[in-house]
């Protein structure tokens, strides 16, 4: 067999061919599109507070996971995919990065006069965390970071894949600007820049702690909780949102630059079974590490 004709595959609970990207995207946007079409024609569905609205919103939010579930049921490997996704994360110290959105929110509270939150006094904090976990990361990350990012990384490298997933992820949210929603009050360009920054950080976590998705899920949760607290603190002005956005995008850009420069000789190589962060750490420490089957 001519090895040049063999297309690379990413191993995560079985071989995930990169040619499955388009079916995944078509399914994801089709499922979400049905939900948003229902919202456009029925204002009662603009909010997930009622039971019918909740079902429609859940269908949209969970569309990436539903898409990969359908594809995995068709091609096989679903059990091993899920087993790896919920496995204990490698390099658990990297999970400290998931606190970055909340740290930046606290930094913004320091910058703006008269705002200092006591998060422990918020009676609905546990409810806020629970809702944001179910209405976000648990419904999306098996698709975005579990499938799409590693499949794109084979062709684009980690940074290119992270940015492209961020763009796709941002436009997946675009219908929210056509209905009454909190997002519709934010300039879409700012939102898109934010989710691209989020995607970079979550991809770093995916590579550093993978094949587990615990890191990206916790980062996504932290982002959503910070956004919820942003509103609860009354920090809803355009100037304040721009400040927070610039802080976050700047922090993500600096971190991405550090990782990219540290591993610049690695990320240009052909993808291996060794996670990016482990490769970078091995280079820094000059200690060879055994490849982990099932990782990047």
Image (spheres, grey):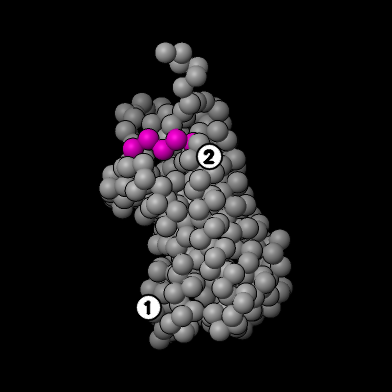
Residue 159: name its quadrant: top right
- Residue displayed at 27% across by 48% down: 79
Which is nearer the eye, 80 or 122?
80
Tell me, yes or no, if residue 182 can be seen here: no
User: Which secondary structure dominates the residues rendered in magenta?
Assistant: strand
> Which element is circle 2 on?
helix
Which is nearer the eye, 112 or 270?
270
> Which element is circle 1 on?
helix
Residue 132 location, x and y as percent? 44, 71
- Residue displayed at 41% across by 68% down: 133
Few, some or many C-alpha atoms within 10 Å of disc 1 (few <14, some 14-19, many ≥20)?
few
The span picked out in magenta is 14-18
- Residue displayed at 32% across by 34% down: 292
Answer above or below: position of 92 versus 296. Answer: below
Residue 282: name its quadrant: top left
The numbered dot on residue 152 is 2
Instruction: Provide the residue designation for mark 1.
Output: 126
Question: Quadrant of the image for the C terminus?
Answer: top left
- Residue displayed at 46% across by 84% down: 50
Residue 55 location, x and y as percent? 44, 74
Residue 22 location, x and y as percent? 54, 44
Few, some or many C-alpha atoms within 10 Å of disc 2 (few <14, some 14-19, many ≥20)?
many
The numbered dot on residue 178 is none
Answer above or below: position of 133 versus 237. Answer: above
As measured in the structure, the alpha-carbon distance from the residue carrying label 2 to the one carrying label 1 is: 35 Å
């Amino acid at each position: 067999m001519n090895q040049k004709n063999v297309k690379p595959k990413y191993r995560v609970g079985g071989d995930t061919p990169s040619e499955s990207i388009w079916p995944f995207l078509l399914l994801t946007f089709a499922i979400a599109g049905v939900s948003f079409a229902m919202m456009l024609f029925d204002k009662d569905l603009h909010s997930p507070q009622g039971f019918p609205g909740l079902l429609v919103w859940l269908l949209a939010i969970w569309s990436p996971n539903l898409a990969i579930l359908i594809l995995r049921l068709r091609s096989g490997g679903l059990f091993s995919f899920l087993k790896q996704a919920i496995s204990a994360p490698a390099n658990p110290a990297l999970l400290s990065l998931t606190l970055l959105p909340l740290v930046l929110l606290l930094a913004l509270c320091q910058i703006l006069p008269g705002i200092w939150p006591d998060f422990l006094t918020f009676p609905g904090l546990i409810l806020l965390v629970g809702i944001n976990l179910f209405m976000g990361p648990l419904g999306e990350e098996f698709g975005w970071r579990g499938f799409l990012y590693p499949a794109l990384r084979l062709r684009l490298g980690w940074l290119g894949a992270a940015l492209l997933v961020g763009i796709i992820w941002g436009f997946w949210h675009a219908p929210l600007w056509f209905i009454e929603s909190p997002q519709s009050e934010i300039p879409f360009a700012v939102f898109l820049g934010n989710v691209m920054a989020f995607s970079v950080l979550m991809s770093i976590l995916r590579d550093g702690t993978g094949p587990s998705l615990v890191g990206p899920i916790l980062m996504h949760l932290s982002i959503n909780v910070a956004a919820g607290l942003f509103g609860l603190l009354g920090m809803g002005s355009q100037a304040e949102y721009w400040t927070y956005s610039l802080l976050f995008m700047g922090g993500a850009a600096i971190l991405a630059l550090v990782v990219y420069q540290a591993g610049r000789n690695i990320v240009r190589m052909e993808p291996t079974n060794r996670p990016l962060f482990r490769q970078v750490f091995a280079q820094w420490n000059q200690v060879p590490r055994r490849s982990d089957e099932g990782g990047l």
